[in-house]
Amino acid sequence: MRDLKSPKSGRAKENRRKKTRQRRDWKRIFPLALRIAVFVGSCALVVSGGILAARMTAELGYFSVDTLRVEGEKRVSSEEILALSDIAPGTSIFDLDLEMIGSKIAGDPWIATAEVERSFPREVVIRVTERLPRAVINLGYLYYVDAGGEIFKVLEANDSLDYPVITGIERNFLLEEPAAARQQLVNAVAVLDELEKRTRFNLDDVSELHYDPAEGLILYTYVGGVPVRIGYGNYAEKLDRLEQIYRDLAPRLLALKYIDLNVTDRVIVRLDTGRASG
């Protein structure tokens, strides 16, 4: 039997491929390596030079803040906003924490949002969006309510009272059930939005919006303080029905006990017999 593993087999030796060792062409390799080394070194010098130039530029004050610009301000003055930003002229524009500055500015009750951005080389731009009061709510103190149904500011001596008043939402309700209370404020603002579009029965005809847990929203007319029960939802449809007859009702408001809009396809009007006879 043939020993296939024997290293002495002549056939195995004949089947081996003889390797020929090639000589390296150093004349070609050396210039290529030299070019690569020069390229890498040049890149390193460029990067280092750029960093050094940036540092020198910053130290010389090229990126020091010298202009502060405020956009979108109306009620809050630009001077007040700049004071809230606490940005000192001469500060490096790269040292500013833009998010923190925006948060500080938005701490003012009139400011809804504040965006701060760098405008190279030396300017900072502050863009603000202010809140718009839509109503006043009585929580022991009077507060403004904005278009999103958010209570945002206690009224001060110089603040205007020329807004509809929301009543019936108590402080405890806000603290214990904030989501439900916020929804009722959103509903109240939705009614105000509907009234603002109208001509026959609009915001000028309403003095108060009252929230009742059982009945929903109740409007009170400016003349006579007549309750207009508007309930929950479908506000546009309900006000459409009221406007169809309001011109006839307006001269009789002082004789009315209430107006109910919660019955589909009709308006229920109840006379106050005591007031009518008086």
Image: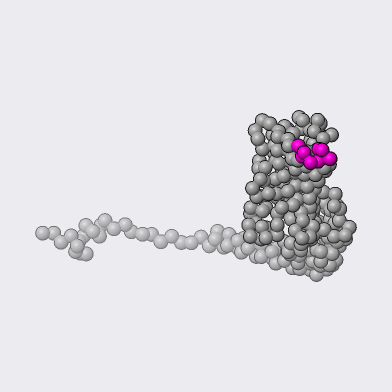
The quadrant of the image that shows the N terminus is bottom left
**x and y percent of residue 51 in the render?**
72, 66
Which quadrant holds residue 101? bottom right
For residue 232, above or below residue 161: above
The outermost residue toward the bottom is 59
Give me the residue at 84% from left, 34% from top: 251
Q: Which residues are magenta?
A: 271-278
Question: Could you tell whether 37 is left or right of 48 in the image?
Answer: left
Give me the residue at 73% from left, 37% from top: 270
The quadrant of the image that shows the C terminus is top right
38 is within the stretch colored magenta: no
Q: Is residue 114 visible?
A: no
**Residue toward you, 255 or 182:** 255
Give me the residue at 77% from left, 39% from top: 272
Q: Is residue 273 visible?
A: yes
**Residue toward you, 28 or 98:** 98
**Residue toward you, 39 or 104:** 104
**x and y percent of residue 221 in the render?**
80, 42
Dominant SS type (magenta):
helix
Count of residue discs:
0
